[in-house]
Amino acid sequence: MKLKMMIVDDSDAFRDIMKELLVRIGFEIVIEAKDCDEAVREFEKERPDVIFIDMILPDKSGVEVTKAILKIDPRAIIIAMSAMINKRLIKEALSAGAKDFLFKPTNEMALNTVIQMWGGE
């Protein structure tokens, strides 16, 4: 079974990097969203297995996106991401229901580890 991945980030460049990393480690289905509304729409339509969400988005925070997705499906696997090393942000993301937190930029090893830990396969 191939897992579906979703990347929620307002940066086209970062989404491209993440998509390339995910494809390189073997994931063919990668869904992208640039803001909260698009993330919720894509989640409802595609039901990805693992969602990577940037915590700093232009329209709403990643915490709000996390809560909105978990309201639809409490079993959703969400991995929070940020370039900011901020203990409060990490705590908020995990309290909102994110399973883990990755710092940006990330690499294949970190992605593979978190996917194996939370996404299975």
Image: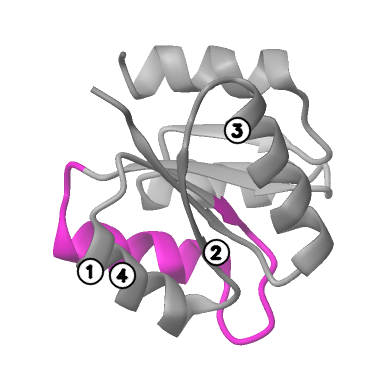
Mark on residue 45?
A: 1
Secondary structure category for the residue under label 1: helix
- Whether the residues at callouts 1 and 4 have beta carbons within 8 Å, the answer is no
Q: Give the range drawn in magenta.
A: 53-75
**Viewed as shown, does residue 28 lie left or right of 77?**
right
Q: Residue 70 at x, y = what percent?
A: 25, 57
Identified by mark 1, the residue type is: Lys
Find out whether residue 97 is within the magenta segment.
Answer: no
Q: Which one is earlier in the sequence, the residue at label 1 or at label 2? A: 1
- Disc 2: CA contacts within 10 A as few (<14), some (14-19) or many (>=20): many
Looking at this view, is 121 or 94 the one in front?
Answer: 121
State the residue at coordinates (47%, 37%): 28
* Separation (CA) of disc 1 from disc 2: 19 Å
Residue sitting at the far front:
28
Find out whether residue 71 is within the magenta segment.
Answer: yes
- Disc 4: CA contacts within 10 A as few (<14), some (14-19) or many (>=20): some
Looking at this view, is 74 or 86 the one in front?
Answer: 74
Q: Name the residue under label 3.
A: 22
Identified by mark 4, the residue type is: Ala
State the residue at coordinates (76%, 67%): 12
Q: Which one is earlier in the sequence, the residue at label 2 or at label 3? A: 3
- Disc 1: CA contacts within 10 A as few (<14), some (14-19) or many (>=20): few
**Viewed as shown, does residue 97 lie left or right of 94?**
left
**Viewed as shown, does residue 75 lie left or right of 69?**
left
Q: Residue 90 at x, y = what percent?
A: 62, 43
Q: Residue 82 at x, y = what percent?
A: 73, 49
* Separation (CA) of disc 4 from disc 3: 24 Å
Mark 1 or mark 2, whichever is nearer to me: 1
Q: Quadrant of residue 107?
A: top right
Q: Name the residue under label 4.
A: 68
Q: Mark 2 points at which residue?
A: 62
State the residue at coordinates (41%, 13%): 117
